[in-house]
Image (spheres, rainbow, N blue to C red):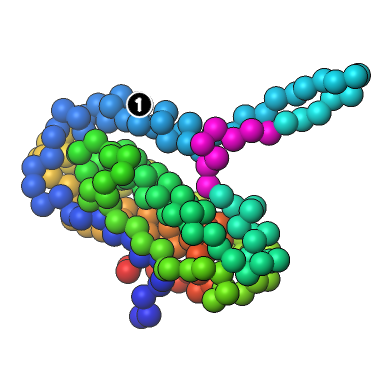
Amino acid sequence: MEPHPVRFWVDYPDRLLNRMTSAFRFVTIIPIAILLGLLDHANASYQTSGGSGTWVMAGTGGGAVLAPVVLMLLFREKYPRWWYDWNLELARFGNRVVAYWLLMDDRYPSTDDHQAVHLDYPEVTGPELNRWLPLVKWFLAIPHYFVLFFLWIALFFVGIYVWFAILFTGRYPRGAFDFIEGVLRWGNRVAGYAFAMVTDTYPPFRLAA
């Protein structure tokens, strides 16, 4: 199997995990989840002037840079480096928060250190990408949306099993860890292809690396 350009993995915690923070993860995650939400948040306001109304959309932190990347690739065949860095680091941060929520790491998510969660995008500047594909990548990825929907349902029940396993044994079952890591890997490949648009390589239908 050829490795996909978008690479994702999580270091397996081969040690006793903190049972207390695992038991109350739904509470301890709140502050960092709020911070992540602020980075991804966009708010709309309605302004009136001279009897006419105008919708103004303003981003708090900007979230992921998506539409501007499509336009730049389409008309300039360029992927600005700082947009690339922002999308990658935001995705890395989001994955650290998700991995913490799924009990894959009991260390509190860092805003900059990679910790146990690793996500790599291929280096792109723009010319190596097809300029027209960004217009349809979201559509071409539709089959993956359906598969991921059911995978996340399965992940929910596996996550409940993991929660009880950690409470009673302090350890993360390896099979469950590999499955959850695979689902996250699948989702990151689809996101890198259809939304971050850092590769033209279609995501494979597999959990493995």
Q: Residue at x 59, y 52 (%)?
A: 66
Q: Pinpoint residue 90: horizontal percent, then vertical percent.
A: 43, 46
Image quarter where the N terminus lies is bottom left
Vertical arrangement, residue 80 with respect to residue 17, above or below: below
Q: Pinpoint residue 85: horizontal percent, then vertical percent.
A: 44, 54
Q: Is residue 158 magenta?
A: no
**Does any portion of residue 58 appear in the rendered image?**
yes
- Which residue, as the protein is rendered here, is positioned at the far bottom? 1
Q: Is residue 125 left or right of residue 97?
A: right
Residue type beneath disc 1? Pro
Q: Observer-nearest residue: 128 or 16?
A: 128
Q: Residue at x 62, y 29 (%)?
A: 43
Q: Observer-nearest residue: 148 or 189?
A: 189
Q: Observer-nearest residue: 177 or 39?
A: 39
Q: Which residue is mark 1?
A: 31
Vertical arrangement, residue 55 with respect to residue 65, above or below: above
Q: Is residue 70 left or right of residue 98?
A: right
Q: Pinpoint residue 89: horizontal percent, then vertical percent.
A: 40, 50
Classify mark 1: helix, strand or loop.
helix
Q: Observer-nearest residue: 119 or 204?
A: 119
Q: Main secondary structure of the magenta part?
A: loop
Q: Residue at x 13, y 40 (%)?
A: 17
Question: Which region shows up in magenta?
Answer: 57-64
Q: Pinpoint residue 31: horizontal percent, then vertical percent.
A: 35, 26
Image quarter where the C terminus lies is bottom left
